[in-house]
Image (cartoon, helix red, strand yellow):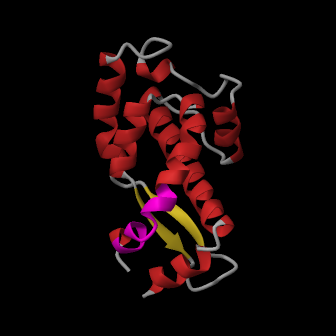
Amino acid sequence: MSESNWTDAIVGERMAVDQQFAAEVRESPFSNQEWGLIMTAAEFEIADADDPDAARIVPETAKVAGIMPEVEKMGGAMGGPGGPAGDRGGDDDGGMFSSVKKGLGLGGGDDGSDRLEDAEALLEQYARTLQEHLVEQGRWEQVRIAYQE
């Protein structure tokens, strides 16, 4: 199934998750505007959709790297917290986002790759939150099966 068909079917759930996820975005190194741009470049798919026990929502982040220069421009233009874009949030900021990055084995590298890794880690966290929400709402199995069609 195409990404837009199955995600269009869960627009209401995504809106609820977006509201719920606002706290994670505030704790991240991205502004709301930067996160919005990142989300426009991200696509989601269901890995292992044919296996009910292993199926999971995963972000496809190939296009995210291409928009990161625009994200950097937004941060610089907005006078983002902490100075240059690469200085916002880091591996040693001690926050929840650092814990998530460390748990996923991400971090290190130069400033540009750190920002991309931050975006990818936050997208992974969003995908898990979305799947958890679908499970709680009793929609996960229906969505998983629809994705396969």
Q: Is residue 78 left or right of residue 137?
A: left
Quadrant in the picture for residue 77: top left
Residue 104 percent coordinates (x, y):
66, 48
Residue 123 percent coordinates (x, y):
51, 49
**Image quadrant in which the N terminus is located:** bottom left
**Image quadrant in which the C terminus is located:** bottom left
| Residue in view at x 55 percent, y 81 percent | 142
Residue 145 percent coordinates (x, y):
52, 84
| Residue in view at x 43 percent, y 32 percent | 32
Residue 131 percent coordinates (x, y):
60, 63
> Quick check: 148 above or below 115?
below
Q: Is residue 134 left or right of residue 63?
A: right
Whether residue 13 is in magenta: the answer is yes
> Quick check: 80 above or below 95?
above
| Residue in view at x 42 percent, y 17 percent | 80
The residues colored magenta run 5-14
**Dominant secondary structure of the magenta stretch?**
helix
Quadrant in the picture for residue 129: bottom right
> Quick check: 24 above or below 43?
above
| Residue in view at x 41 percent, y 67 percent | 7
Whether residue 129 is in magenta: the answer is no
